[in-house]
Image (tube, rainbow, N blue to C red):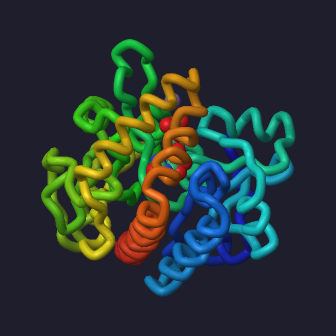
Amino acid sequence: MIDPTCSDEVAGALADGRAVVALESTIFSHLGLPTPFNREALERCLAAVRDGGAVPAVTAVLDGVVRLGLSDAEHERILGPARKAAERDVAVAVGQGWEVGATTVSASVAIAAAAGVPVFATGGIGGVHRGAEITGDISADLDAIASHPVITVSAGAKAFLDLPRTLEFLETAGAPVLGWQHDWFPAFYTRSSGLPVPHRVDSADEVARIFAARSRPASGILLTVPIPVVDELDTAELDEVLTEALADCERAGVTGAAITPFVLGRIGAATEGRSVPANLALAENNASVAAQVAVAVAAT
Ligand code: PSU
Ligand code: MN
């Protein structure tokens, strides 16, 4: 079973019942954001969690050990070369002693749950890929969100995914999807995918009450937070970029777990300076909302 080694600060906070926010490490690795913006993203997310009154706890596998809460030197390690580790890969990373396993949403939610941390923040989640009816490519993030007792805070998912099917999957899996002060499922760079969220929430206390009232103790919740208005990108421009990125991916014959990092890289390159600032702003905003939610959950 996953048995995370917590930093002293995280262990202390958990023992005292103080708020902790888990963060994934794939987004901060070269798989998620280009250097030096990955460092900026990490620093801004850590600060946003602390400013919100919670303790940040980055997840990773370092030298074959599952970790929750890292030192400054260990944060440095996840900014360098890393192997992508989804939930199922965590066991492999431990068994094989991977030097740096960058944990995805699914892995991070599993690690947070194992340590008793009920709130986790990321940028965007993985989802059902377009064409999944042929390829079967559905991110392990969705099952993990639904089946671990953790609130995942994200800006929805990028529109290169099949967002209607992503929402359908979460419904089938039994995960409530809540819109933070917003009626629409966000599409990462844009505030609305055009799809309504099943339920809107307006306060962290409301999220905490919903979390406490769920029918299955082992299940989770997805809280979607739209990118701040000032940071939103233009939908028409993005549509073109996403279509081109997916076509490139197919032409290059990229498959499986490599698809998401490949498409993220293409989107970043095609939108040059615009997508990265948006990505950083939404990740920081999610971390800030997650801290509020963690404080509310800790108080219930
Ligand atoms: N979407 C993003 N940025 C990311 C990811 C997804 O906009 O960094 C990463 C997250 O770590 C997520 C993972 O958990 O990709 C999903 O990968 P896959 O599609 O292979 O399940
Ligand atoms: Mn996949």
**Of residues 241 and 113, the one drawn nearer to the viewer in this rendering:** 241
Above/below status of 213 relative to 52: above
Q: Where is 150 relative to 128, above or below?
A: below
| Image position, residue 148 (x, y; %) | 46, 44
Residue ID at (56%, 70%):
41
Residue at (55, 47) in percent of width and height: 265
In the image, taking residue 102 as reference, residue 112 lies left or right, namely: left
Q: In which quarter of the image is residue 155?
A: bottom left
* The quadrant where residue 42 appears: bottom right
Res 190 quadrant in image = bottom left
Residue 197 vertical position relative to residue 288 in the rendered view, above or below: above
Which of the image's four quarters has the C terminus?
bottom left
Q: Is residue 88 left or right of residue 75?
A: left
Residue farthest top in this picture: 134
Q: In this view, does 255 lie above or below 191?
A: above
Nearest the camera: 215 or 69? 69
User: Where residue 226 sits: x, y (%)?
Assistant: 28, 63
